[in-house]
Amino acid sequence: MKVAVLCSGRGSNLLALLEAAEAGLLGPAELRLVLADSKEAGAINIAREWGLYAAVVPRTAYHANRDGFERRLLEVMAPHEIEIVVLAGFLRVLGPVFLAAFPNKIINVHPALLPAFPGRDVWPLEVASGVKLAGATVHLVEKGVDSGPIIIQGSVPVLDEDEPETLAARILKVEHRILPQALAWLASGRLIIEDGRVRLKDLPKTGREEEVFIWPPLEG
Ligand code: GAR
């Protein structure tokens, strides 16, 4: 399954995908192409260092014309016969033109336990809200901001001394683990999507089904 990765920023999730591919952890998913919406995106350099085809489609060149921007993305992708799209820190909301081209084949990683805290720059909001658990989500992309059926989530504690930056770094480690896994599952046809929910085909029992994670930890 040929995969395009769309990025807007530094590209650490892209790097996690490249490392997972190298370790043979992506199943039938093959990373073919990286697209960025700005030439400042560090992800472009990472892609080139790893010998992956990379291109920039500057969003600013399209002003209010989201459809035009998305048609251009599709045009650049077309020769690569892309089958799956991963949004790895892609900070644009996709519209009908792009979504219609890849039904149930676009995934997004987000630094919160959705449906709480959708949107950009969520870490200050998570810290300020006083939640005790934060985390990351990978979901199938539907119209709307960070919305669509959830594939996998991972949680971390929010510490009393956390600043947005320290919480973001803890969550990022979760992102780097769950994004490659979600992509491998999608590419190998393991996701069953029904009534807005995702089930995993042939999910093996791990013995951890009753595990709970409580923060702050219980005493006594
Ligand atoms: C990641 O934390 C990702 O979850 C977030 O942007 C960051 C990109 O980092 N995405 C969103 O907030 C989407 N709403 P990266 O460029 O190092 O992968």
Image: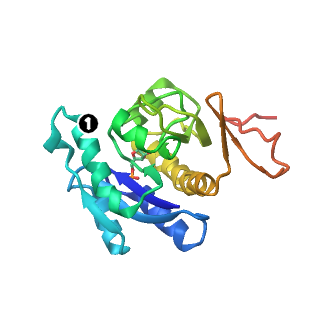
Which residue is drawn at the image coordinates 41% and 43% (left, top)?
101
Residue type (three-letter) at the residue carrying disc 1? Asp
Which residue is drawn at the image coordinates 19% and 49% (left, top)?
58
**Quick one: label 1, few (<14), some, or many (20+) residues within 10 Å?**
some
The answer to whether residue 96 is left or right of residue 25 is left
Q: Nearer the viewer, residue 95 or 167?
A: 95
Q: Could you say where residue 196 lies in the image, as x and y percent from the top left?
A: 61, 29
Q: Could you say where residue 35 lies in the image, as x and y percent from the top left?
A: 31, 56
Q: Could you say where residue 95 lies in the image, as x and y percent from the top left?
A: 35, 33
The answer to whether residue 173 is left or right of residue 213 is left
Q: How is the image coloured?
A: rainbow
Q: Is residue 194 above or below residue 182?
A: above
Which residue is drawn at the image coordinates 29% and 59% (left, top)?
42
The answer to whether residue 86 is left or right of residue 195 is left
The residue identified by callout 1 is: 67
Determine the secondary structure under disc 1. helix
Q: Is residue 10 above or below residue 210?
A: below
Q: Is residue 49 visible?
A: yes
Q: Nearer the viewer, residue 130 or 138?
A: 138
The answer to whether residue 32 is left or right of residue 29 is left
Which residue is drawn at the image coordinates 52% and 26% (left, top)?
130
Q: Nearer the viewer, residue 17 or 68?
A: 68
For the C terminus, give its image quadrant: top right
Q: Could you say where residue 211 lies in the image, as x and y percent from the top left?
A: 79, 41
Q: Is residue 30 above or below residue 149?
A: below
